[in-house]
Image (cartoon, rainbow, N blue to C red):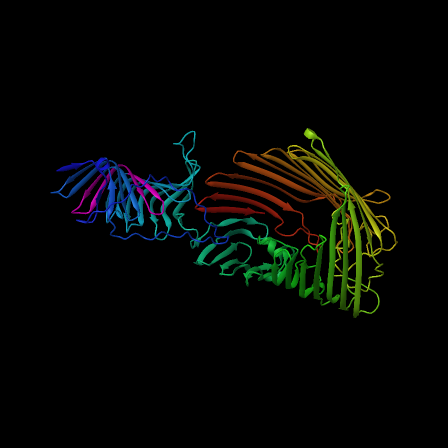
Amino acid sequence: MSRRAGRILGFLVLALAPRAGFAQAPLLPPIAPPASVAPSLPGGTPAPAAAAPPAPPQNAPVTFTADEVQYDQNAALVVARGRVEAFQGGRILRADELTYNRNTGVATARGNVQLIEADGQVFFAENAVLTNQMRDGVLEGLRGYLLQNGRIAASGARRTSGSIFDLAQVVYTVCDPCKDDPLAPPIWQLRARTATLDRTEQQVRYRGASLDMAGVPVIWLPYFQHPDGSSPRQSGFLSPSFGITKYLGGFIETPYYWAIDESQELVLRPTTSTRVVPNLGLDYRRRFNTGEIEVLSSIGHLDGRDGTEEGFAGHIFAKGRFSLDETWRTGFDVNRASSEQYLRIYRYGAQRVLPTTLFTEGFWGPEGFARFDARAYQGLRRTDDISRIPLVLPNIYADWQSPEDSLGGRFTIDTWNFAVFRGTGTSTRRAATRMGYALPRMDDLGGIWTLRAQSDLAAYDFEDINLAPNFAKGDANGQAAAANIRAALDWRMPFLRDGGDWGRQVIEPRVQLVTGPMTGSQYRIPNEDSIVFDFTDANLFSLNRFTGRDRQEGGTRADMALRGAWFLPEDRQLEAVVGRSFRVQEDGGPFYPYSGLENRASDWVSRLTFRPSSWIDLTGRARRGGESFAARAYDVSATLRPTNDTGFTLGYLQAPPMPFLNPVAQREEIYLGARQRLGLWQVSAFGRQDVQLNRPVSVGVSAMYEDECFIFETRFVKRYAEDPATGDLFPGATVLLFRFGFKTIGDFGLRAL
C-alpha cells in the first residue's frame, strides 16, 4: 500500500471509469448555495430561458484533491481523506472521506457530503454511495438547496439516471430559518411520505403530503406537484381560486397554463359555479421577432337575474405591437364585451366604454411624428344609444418641428384629418392643418420675451349637423371652412433672491397679449374634438384654449399671472400661481356657461404647491368667479407621510356642470386614504364620498403580509355604482377577497359577495 499527500505534492487525478488515464484540472473555489431567481409568472410575458452550459461528456474523467490519499493497487481501492473534492462531468463532490473501488465503480462518501450540480443546485448528505460516474446512488440524511431559495430535506434518497431523486420522509420550504430560533418550524412547509424530484421534467411530486403552517398541518394533499424552480415556464395547473358571490353562488376557478413553446403560451380559466353555467376564460400570448400579441377573452352565460341580460355573453381584450423597421411600427387594440355587468360579475375589469383601434405610426427623433389609425367605440350600459357612438375611419395626424433657426426660433407644422360616422347623429369629414412659430429672447434686465404665432385652417363636410352632438339649426347637410390666426407676445420677469440658509425666493409676473381676428359664429362647424373644456392655470396662456381644432378662440385679450416661489433647503418649497384673462371684445368664442371664459373677464385660476417638510405635500387648483369670487371648481389633494411606513391622502374635488356630459350636474367629492406598514404587514383603507348626493361612491380596506416565502392578502371593496336604467347597484360591485400565496408552489384565493 502506498500513501501520497495530495495537497502537498500536487493534484492526484483518477478516472472513475476502471483503468482510465490521468488528467489535470485546477482547484475550484468553494461554491455557495445558489441565489434566489425570480422567473416570469405564467400570467406575465414569458421570460427567455437562460442559456444552458454545454453538457459535459458522460465519460469525462474525475479530478479530485484531498489532504491524504491511500491507494491499494492490489485491491484497486482508493481512499481519500481530509477536505476531499472530486470534479466530474460538471458535478462537484465534497466529503470528509471518499472511498472508490475501481473494479466495481462504486464511490462511497462519508461525513459532510456535498453534491453540487452543474446548474448550481446543492445537495447535502451524511453518507452517499454513488455509481455510474456519480450520476446514481443512495444518500442518507439528504438536504438540498434548489433554485428560488428552495430547501428540501429527506431521511433518505435514491438517485437514478442522474436526474431523478426518489425521496422518503420529505420536507420542502422556501422560508428562511428564524434568526432568533433556527430550529423553530418555518412559516410554511410541505411534508410528505414520499416524493420524487424529477430534474428532467423540472418537477417535484409528493404523495401523502400535508401543508404545515408554523408546524401545524392545515391541508392534507394525497398528491401534489410543483416546479422545482429551474425553469421559468412550465405547463401545468395553476393554483385555484374559489369563493361565493350573490350572483354566482359558490364558484371555483381552476386555471391551466400551457407553455406551447418558447414564444407562445395559453392559459385556460374555467370557472364552475352553483347558480350559472360554467364560464371559460382564455389568455393567449405570443412573441415574434418583430413584435408580440396578447388576447384575453372569455365566454359564458347570463340568466337575467339582478338586472343582467339573458343569454350567451363574453369578452375579448386583444392587443398587438409590431415593428416594421427602425422608423415605423403598427398595432391594434380590440376591446369588446357583452355588457358592463358581465365584466363585473366575472372580474374581467369593468369599464364604461371600450375602444378598438388599428394604427400605424412613425417616429423621426424629436423632429417628426406621423400616425394613421381607425377607431371604434362600444358603450356598455343599456342607456347608451349605440347609433350615436362614432366610428372614426381614418384618423390621420402628422407633425414636424424644424431645427432652431439663426434667430433662435422654431417652426412647427401639423395636420389632423379624420372622418367620423354615426348611425344617428352628425357625420363629419375634416381636413385641418396648424402652423406655428416661437422665438424666445432675453433683454438686458433679465426679462424673457417670447413671440409666438399660430394659424389654423380646416375644411368640413358633414351630414345631420342638426343631431347630436351638435344640434345646430339650419340645413342638416353641407360643407364649411374655418380659419384662424393668432399672434402673441409673452413677457415674464423672474426676480430672484438668494436668502442663504433661508433658500431662494422667486417672484415672477407674467403678461401675454394675444390678438387675432374675430371667429364669429361657429354653430355651423361640427364639433368633434372640443366638446369638453376645462379652464385652469395650465391653459391660461394657450393661444387657443380649446382642447382641439373644431372650436377657435378669437379677438384680442390679455393674460396675466403672478407666480411666487420659495425654495428652502431639504426639498421644502412654497409655490403659488394666480391669474386671469381679459378680452377686449364681448364675443371671443363659443364658451359655454360655467366654463370660466364665458365673460369678457375670465374666472380667477390658481395653483398652490406647499411642501413645508419632507413628510407633507399639498397641491391644489382652484377656479373662482371673476366678479363674485364664488367657488367654481376645486381640485385639492394633500399627502402626509409622518414616517416612511405611514401615509395619509386627502382630496377634495368640485367640478362645474358640463353641458355635454350626462347627467348635467355639478360634481363634488371627498376622498380619504391611509396606509400603514407594520414590519412585514401593510394595511390601507380608502373612502370616497359624493357630497352632492350625500352617499358614498366607494369604500375599501386591505391588509397584506409578505416575507421571503409567504403572502397573505385580504381586501374588501364596495362600489356604489348604480345602473342608470334601474337605479340598482351593479352586480359584482362588492368584493371580499382573501389570498394566500406560497412562493414557488402557488396562490390560493377566496372571493366572496
Front one among 70 and 685: 70
Q: Would residue 24 be visible to someone looking at this image?
A: yes
Q: Which residues are magenta?
A: 98-125
Query: Which residue corresponds to the image point at 77% horizontal and 68% vertical from the top-left?
Result: 464
Above or below residue 586? Residue 524 is below
Query: Which residue corresponds to the image point at 42% horizontal and 44% vertical from the top-left?
Result: 148
Residue 13, quarter of the rendered image = top left
> Is 277 situated left or right of 28 in this image?
right
> Is 296 situated left or right of 214 in this image?
right
Residue 373, x across and y down, in percent: 64, 64
Residue 183, quarter of the rendered image = top left
Q: Would residue 335 be visible to someone looking at this image?
A: no
Front one among 435 and 530: 435
> Is 224 situated left or right of 132 in this image?
right
Above or below residue 391? Residue 592 is above
Residue 53, x across and y down, in percent: 36, 51
Residue 460, x across and y down, in percent: 76, 67
Figure quadrant of the N terminus: top left
Query: Which residue corresponds to the image point at 84% horizontal and 45% vertical from the top-left?
Result: 626
